[in-house]
Amino acid sequence: MRCVIARFPFDLVKSEVEQSMSGIAPEPVTGVSVTIDGRVFPVMQVGEVITRQNRRDFTSDEMRRALTRLGFTCHDARPVKPARQAWSD
């Protein structure tokens, strides 16, 4: 599948993305994530590996669209729980 990420064209194939991520340990998920071969990766980590670009060069939305079009399941970021105060007034 042809897509543009950070103004650069890429020809991505689902099996090649799976192969690229096979030896990579998933980082802790803090935002949008994607499931690849039963493991959950941050989309920014996947984007950095498959495009060889710096994470600051593309957005999670760009990666999410590309990975969804390839057939991967993407997940929204978990809502942040408000900090609990240790004391009460």
Image (cartoon, grey):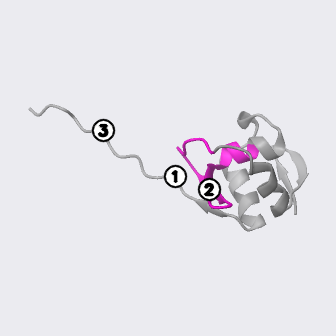
Mark 1, other Cα within 10 Å: few <14 / some 14–19 / many ≥20 = few
- Label 3 and label 1: CA atoms lie apart by 17 Å
Label 1 sits on residue: 77
- The amino acid type, in three-letter code, at marker 1 is Ala
Quarter of the image with the N terminus in it: bottom right
Furthest residue toward bottom = 71
- Label 2 and label 3: CA atoms lie apart by 29 Å
Q: Is residue 49 above or below residue 35?
A: above
Furthest residue toward left = 89
The one of 84 and 38 positioned closer to us in this rendering: 38
Q: Residue at x 67, y 52 (%)?
A: 61
Mark 1 or mark 2, whichever is nearer to me: 2
In the rendered structure, the answer to whether residue 85 lies left or right of residue 75 reads left
Pointers 2 and 3 in contact (CB under 8 A)? no
Which secondary structure, mark 3?
loop
Disc on res. 11: none
- The mark that comes first in sequence, 2 or 3, is 2
Disc on res. 83: 3
Q: Residue at x 68, y 61 (%)?
A: 37
Pointers 3 and 1 in contact (CB under 8 A)? no
- The amino acid type, in three-letter code, at marker 2 is Arg
Which secondary structure, mark 1?
loop
Range of magenta residues = 26-47
Q: Is residue 57 above or below residue 26?
A: above
- The amino acid type, in three-letter code, at marker 3 is Ala
Mark 2 or mark 3, whichever is nearer to me: 2
Q: Residue at x 68, y 43 (%)?
A: 45
Indicate the position of residue 67 as horizontal and vertical percent values.
73, 59
In the rendered structure, the answer to whether residue 38 lies left or right of residue 4 reads left
- Label 1 and label 2: CA atoms lie apart by 16 Å
Label 2 sits on residue: 39
Which secondary structure, mark 2?
strand
